[in-house]
Image (spheres, rainbow, N blue to C red):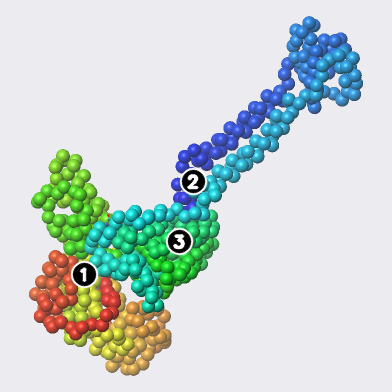
Amino acid sequence: MNPRDKRAGGERRSLGPTRPGGAVWYILGLLFLLALAQAWFMAPAGRQVSYSEFKQAVRSGQVAEVFVGDQTIRGTYKRETNGGRSFNTTRIEDPKLIEDLDAASVKYTGEMVSRWLPEVLGWVVPLLLLFGVWSFFFRRMSGAEGGVMSFARSKHRVFSEDDVKVSFADVAGVDEAEQELKEIVEFLQNPKKYTTLGGRIPKGVLLVGPPGTGKTLLARAVAGEAKVPFFSLSGSEFVEMFVGVGAARVRDLFNQAEAKAPCIIFIDELDALGRARVQSPMGSHEEREQTLNQLLAEMDGFDSRKAIIIMGATNRPEVLDPALLRPGRFDRQVLVDKPDVNGREEVLRIHTKNVKLAPTVNLRVVAARTAGFAGADLANLVNEAALLAARKDKTAVEPTDFDEAIDRLIAGLEKKRVMSRKEREIVAYHESGHAIVATAIPGMDPVHKISIVQRGFGALGYTMQLPLEDRYLMQRKDLLNQLAVLLGGRTAEEIALGEISTGAQNDLQRATDIARAMVTEWGMSDALGAINYDGHKRSRFLDIPIGPERGAYAEDTGRLIDSEVKRIMTDAHNEARDILTRRRDILESVTRRLLEIEVMEGAELRNMMGIAPPPPTSETIPLPTNELR
Ligand code: ADP
Ligand code: MG
Ligand code: ZN
């Protein structure tokens, strides 16, 4: 846990009467009272007289009563002689005092009153104070809600079966995620069916996606559909001040869940807790790491036949500790992405169910105007529009209300980088360029999908190619073709807009990487021959960039390498330009269509280009390639 968290936590909890400032005043006040009491009881009452005067008075029988204190003697005179006034005097070592008092038959007592109270106060009050201060800090540390003894119990809310009223019908625009989660629902409803054959039920499902896309909603929908208890808590709730509390919570959570299996444990904002464990110079984040370790141990430990599914959600999968993603933990990852135009229409339909819409409202149009909105943004939009209509005393929400609400929200979302109309056009040309070049060159992996839906992780759009088979070797021709596809995006921008954008930077980097590797590592340049000029080996995966260090070669060779890389790149660029100029009209129509529907299937693209469908593909998970960043 870092110090900033600590401070934030402290501020949150110290609201109210136990503010630190308040405590200081409280303590000062007590001290003041104590001093007053001391002064009161110690204060000599009555007239100060000298000891000789006092002795004289005793002998002459004027004194009625004395209290003999440690240092002072207080007393009262007889009413008859001195009107019963009181006096006091400083005590002097005087062995004969008692004798004299007896002789004068003065009533005398050892003075207790002036001693016991201050003395008791003297040690009880500081003790009380100490206790007060201690319990004050203790309460702060263990969290006000938790109380002193219950801090180890987790604060999760437990939904019983009826409590989760969410179903898949409440979620829209994330069909692929929904499809994958349906399987989980089946597991939960009928665990026996899957385990009798010796199979293992998946343990962990991680929902990954940008904020507001419905991850939490989906997790609850799984519980609702499967009609199983839903234990949910947020990763940030685990992060506590006391070392060991988080770990205790995890243990407690799993114990409770195990008693209720089949059920779902949902850990929202997993990244708050599951951040990669690092050796930091500031000391360790021990608490978080202990909690994480406990979570890992629990996930490994519980009986996989028990049908407990652990779901997690995060919008920052890249910071997660790799250990969380290993088999047997969150080994299934489900992408929950922003919806395309059809998805947005459905989401709007769901959220307008209880809203009075004017018959002129066309949700399709609203959906088309809200590119880049996540589900939560759309829910917010509907609400905003309804509020605007209500403010104008309308009886139904009209299209103008939606327009106004969209404008407002887009202004707000501008910071979250929703693309402008111009930017969308650039991205559409760019992706069309990649896709057309990939389709036009025979023998390339067929295009699976083109998308200009702004994705969460920095990509503005993508073209996805589906490999027909696993590849272990690439021939020079394949690599040159790949270069042409990579440069296709930028080339399309050049051709259609006469201008290039920064969006192709990642393409360029990857293309240059490949071209350089062709020359220096794979000996694919005739000018340089079959020599590895690069001092180190690279992984088989092209995506891993070459490190900054170079192999040892002469300066001349370096110049030759550069010029060969340039030649290869130029050739690829020319080929891409060739392909796209010959298909200028197709580039235009694909771009227009893409702007309209945002996600285009490969089949439609091939149809538009008049190209036969590819042979059936192996069932590989498509990985986005050519991401435009
Ligand atoms: P996340 O957890 O991904 O940040 P949430 O699940 O908390 O997003 O979404 C917040 C709200 O936004 C939901 O309660 C729901 O009303 C709305 N919402 C988000 N995504 C969708 C969706 N795909 N379909 C319908 N409603 C959605
Ligand atoms: Mg959430
Ligand atoms: Zn690109």
Determine whether the beta carbon of the residue marked 1 sits less than 8 angstroms from the nearest atom of ligand 3.
no
Q: Does residue 297 appear in this view? A: yes
Classify mark 2: helix, strand or loop.
Answer: loop
Q: Is residue 190 left or right of residue 50?
A: left
* Residue 269 visible: no
Density class for disc 3 (Cα within 10 Å; few <14, some 14-19, many ≥20) is few
- Asked whether the residues under the numbered discs 3 and 2 touch, taking CB atoms below 8 Å apart as contact, a structural biologist would say no
Q: Residues within 10 Å of mark 1 (few under 14, many from 20)?
A: many
- Residue at mark 2: C-beta within 8 A of ligand 2: no
Mark 2 or 1: the one toward you: 2
In the rendered image, which residue does mark 3 sit on?
259
Question: Percent position (x, y) of residue 320?
Answer: 41, 67
Q: Where on the picture, by quarter, is residue 509?
A: bottom left
N-terminal of the pair, mark 2 or mark 1, is 2
- The image position of residue 149, as x and y in percent, is 54, 49
- Residue under label 1, please give it: 451
Q: Say what amino acid the circle numbered 1 marks.
A: Ser
Q: Between tags 3 and 2, which lies in front?
A: 3
Residue lying at 80% horizontally and 27% vertically, measured from the top left: 70
